[in-house]
Amino acid sequence: MATVIRFSDISKETCYFEDFPEMTLDMGYNYQAILDPTSIEVTVTPATDGYGLTGSFPYRVVTACSRCLGEVIIQGLASFDLLYKPGNQSPRARELNISSADSCVVFYRDDLPLRNLLLQQIYLELPEKILCKEECLGLCPDCGANLNEGSCGCSGSIDPRWNGLQSLLPS
Protein backbone atom coordinates (compact mmCIF):
# COMPACT_ATOMS: atom_id res chain seq x y z
CA MET A 1 0.00 0.00 0.00
CA ALA A 2 1.36 3.41 -0.96
CA THR A 3 2.28 5.70 1.91
CA VAL A 4 0.71 9.16 1.85
CA ILE A 5 1.59 12.15 4.04
CA ARG A 6 -1.71 13.64 5.18
CA PHE A 7 -0.70 17.08 6.38
CA SER A 8 -4.08 17.67 8.07
CA ASP A 9 -3.43 14.69 10.40
CA ILE A 10 0.02 15.81 11.59
CA SER A 11 0.22 17.55 14.97
CA LYS A 12 3.64 16.31 16.12
CA GLU A 13 6.84 15.04 14.53
CA THR A 14 5.98 11.99 12.42
CA CYS A 15 8.26 9.58 10.57
CA TYR A 16 7.43 7.82 7.30
CA PHE A 17 9.23 5.01 5.54
CA GLU A 18 8.51 3.18 2.30
CA ASP A 19 10.30 0.66 0.08
CA PHE A 20 10.03 1.14 -3.68
CA PRO A 21 10.61 -1.42 -6.43
CA GLU A 22 12.61 -0.68 -9.56
CA MET A 23 11.11 2.27 -11.46
CA THR A 24 11.44 3.58 -15.00
CA LEU A 25 12.02 7.33 -15.07
CA ASP A 26 10.88 9.38 -18.06
CA MET A 27 13.77 11.68 -18.93
CA GLY A 28 11.98 13.29 -21.90
CA TYR A 29 12.63 12.95 -25.63
CA ASN A 30 11.87 9.18 -25.49
CA TYR A 31 14.80 8.83 -23.09
CA GLN A 32 14.51 6.66 -19.98
CA ALA A 33 16.47 5.76 -16.88
CA ILE A 34 16.03 2.87 -14.46
CA LEU A 35 15.98 3.63 -10.73
CA ASP A 36 17.00 0.54 -8.75
CA PRO A 37 14.86 -0.49 -5.75
CA THR A 38 15.25 1.98 -2.89
CA SER A 39 13.76 3.06 0.43
CA ILE A 40 12.84 6.59 1.46
CA GLU A 41 12.74 7.85 5.02
CA VAL A 42 10.98 11.15 5.79
CA THR A 43 10.40 13.08 9.01
CA VAL A 44 7.56 15.60 8.99
CA THR A 45 7.59 18.32 11.66
CA PRO A 46 4.85 20.92 12.14
CA ALA A 47 6.17 24.47 11.67
CA THR A 48 4.52 27.85 12.27
CA ASP A 49 3.66 28.32 8.60
CA GLY A 50 3.61 24.74 7.25
CA TYR A 51 5.51 21.50 7.70
CA GLY A 52 9.21 20.74 7.61
CA LEU A 53 10.15 17.62 5.65
CA THR A 54 13.61 16.16 6.04
CA GLY A 55 14.72 12.85 4.68
CA SER A 56 16.96 10.86 2.43
CA PHE A 57 17.21 7.80 0.23
CA PRO A 58 20.05 5.99 -1.52
CA TYR A 59 19.79 5.78 -5.29
CA ARG A 60 21.36 3.97 -8.20
CA VAL A 61 20.21 4.97 -11.66
CA VAL A 62 21.16 3.22 -14.90
CA THR A 63 20.72 5.21 -18.08
CA ALA A 64 22.39 6.01 -21.40
CA CYS A 65 25.07 8.57 -22.18
CA SER A 66 23.63 11.56 -24.04
CA ARG A 67 26.40 11.43 -26.65
CA CYS A 68 27.36 7.78 -27.24
CA LEU A 69 24.37 5.93 -25.75
CA GLY A 70 26.71 3.81 -23.61
CA GLU A 71 25.51 2.70 -20.18
CA VAL A 72 25.99 5.18 -17.33
CA ILE A 73 25.50 4.43 -13.64
CA ILE A 74 24.79 7.32 -11.29
CA GLN A 75 24.53 6.63 -7.58
CA GLY A 76 24.49 8.50 -4.33
CA LEU A 77 22.42 9.54 -1.34
CA ALA A 78 19.67 12.09 -1.94
CA SER A 79 19.00 14.28 1.10
CA PHE A 80 16.39 16.99 1.37
CA ASP A 81 15.22 19.60 3.85
CA LEU A 82 12.02 21.24 2.62
CA LEU A 83 9.28 23.47 3.96
CA TYR A 84 5.80 22.59 2.73
CA LYS A 85 3.30 25.45 2.97
CA PRO A 86 -0.42 25.42 2.16
CA GLY A 87 -1.17 26.45 -1.43
CA ASN A 88 -3.17 29.48 -0.28
CA GLN A 89 0.13 30.99 0.98
CA SER A 90 1.67 30.79 -2.49
CA PRO A 91 2.77 34.19 -3.83
CA ARG A 92 1.12 35.54 -6.95
CA ALA A 93 3.14 35.26 -10.15
CA ARG A 94 3.89 39.00 -10.23
CA GLU A 95 5.27 38.84 -6.67
CA LEU A 96 7.91 36.21 -7.40
CA ASN A 97 11.43 37.11 -6.36
CA ILE A 98 12.90 33.80 -5.30
CA SER A 99 15.83 33.81 -2.92
CA SER A 100 18.01 30.78 -2.21
CA ALA A 101 16.06 30.25 1.04
CA ASP A 102 12.80 30.10 -0.95
CA SER A 103 14.14 27.36 -3.22
CA CYS A 104 13.34 24.81 -0.51
CA VAL A 105 9.72 25.94 -0.11
CA VAL A 106 7.00 23.83 -1.73
CA PHE A 107 3.34 24.82 -1.83
CA TYR A 108 0.87 21.98 -1.50
CA ARG A 109 -2.85 21.60 -2.09
CA ASP A 110 -3.40 17.93 -1.25
CA ASP A 111 -1.79 15.07 0.57
CA LEU A 112 1.67 13.98 -0.58
CA PRO A 113 2.32 10.40 -1.71
CA LEU A 114 5.89 9.41 -0.80
CA ARG A 115 6.34 8.14 -4.37
CA ASN A 116 5.82 11.70 -5.67
CA LEU A 117 8.35 13.07 -3.19
CA LEU A 118 10.88 10.42 -4.21
CA LEU A 119 10.41 11.20 -7.91
CA GLN A 120 10.71 14.97 -7.34
CA GLN A 121 13.97 14.50 -5.50
CA ILE A 122 15.54 11.95 -7.87
CA TYR A 123 14.98 14.26 -10.85
CA LEU A 124 16.82 16.98 -8.91
CA GLU A 125 19.75 14.61 -8.29
CA LEU A 126 20.33 13.71 -11.93
CA PRO A 127 22.39 15.99 -14.18
CA GLU A 128 20.62 17.67 -17.08
CA LYS A 129 23.04 16.13 -19.57
CA ILE A 130 24.21 12.66 -18.60
CA LEU A 131 27.63 11.70 -19.98
CA CYS A 132 29.73 8.56 -19.58
CA LYS A 133 32.77 10.86 -19.32
CA GLU A 134 33.25 14.59 -19.83
CA GLU A 135 35.33 14.08 -22.99
CA CYS A 136 32.90 11.59 -24.60
CA LEU A 137 33.22 11.80 -28.40
CA GLY A 138 29.73 10.48 -29.11
CA LEU A 139 28.61 8.67 -32.25
CA CYS A 140 29.70 9.23 -35.85
CA PRO A 141 26.89 11.15 -37.56
CA ASP A 142 27.41 9.13 -40.77
CA CYS A 143 27.77 5.50 -39.68
CA GLY A 144 26.77 5.62 -35.99
CA ALA A 145 30.03 4.10 -34.69
CA ASN A 146 31.01 4.90 -31.11
CA LEU A 147 33.96 7.29 -31.56
CA ASN A 148 35.21 6.53 -28.02
CA GLU A 149 36.22 3.10 -29.33
CA GLY A 150 38.35 4.52 -32.15
CA SER A 151 38.01 6.08 -35.56
CA CYS A 152 35.19 4.71 -37.67
CA GLY A 153 36.85 5.04 -41.07
CA CYS A 154 34.12 7.21 -42.58
CA SER A 155 35.21 9.76 -45.13
CA GLY A 156 34.24 12.53 -42.75
CA SER A 157 32.31 14.25 -45.49
CA ILE A 158 30.84 17.59 -44.57
CA ASP A 159 27.12 18.19 -44.96
CA PRO A 160 26.80 20.24 -48.19
CA ARG A 161 24.55 22.72 -46.40
CA TRP A 162 27.68 24.01 -44.62
CA ASN A 163 29.65 24.65 -47.86
CA GLY A 164 28.89 28.37 -47.73
CA LEU A 165 30.87 28.62 -44.49
CA GLN A 166 34.01 27.15 -46.12
CA SER A 167 34.69 30.52 -47.77
CA LEU A 168 35.00 32.10 -44.31
CA LEU A 169 37.88 29.85 -43.27
CA PRO A 170 41.44 31.10 -43.81
CA SER A 171 43.21 29.40 -46.70
Image (spheres, helix red, strand yellow):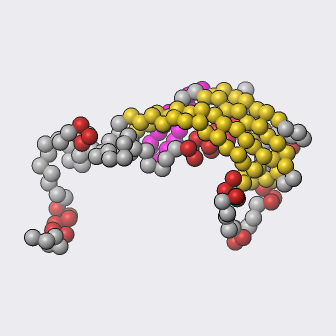
Using residue 151 as the reference point, say whether residue 32 is left or right of it.
right
115 or 76: nearer the viewer: 76
* Residue at point 64%, 40% (across, down): 79
| Residue that lies at the very extreme toward the right in this rendered image | 11
Using residue 70 as the reference point, say whether residue 164 is left or right of it.
left
* Residue at point 54%, 29% (across, down): 36
The image quadrant where one finds the N terminus is top right
27 or 45: nearer the viewer: 45
Q: Look at the image and tell me whether residue 111 can be seen.
A: yes
29 is within the stretch colored magenta: yes
Q: Where is residue 66, by image quadrant?
A: top left
Query: Does residue 99 lie above or below 170 as drawn?
Result: above
* Residue at point 45%, 34% (across, down): 73
From the top left corner, tell me how far across and down residue 25 is, in percent: 53, 38
From the top left corner, tell me how far across and down residue 146 is, in percent: 26, 40
Query: Does residue 137 lie above or below 166 as drawn?
Result: above
Query: Does residue 166 lie above or below 11 as drawn?
Result: below
The stretch in magenta equals: 21-35
Q: Where is residue 63, by image quadrant?
A: top left
43 is within the stretch colored magenta: no
From the top left corner, tell me how far across and down residue 148 is, in percent: 26, 40
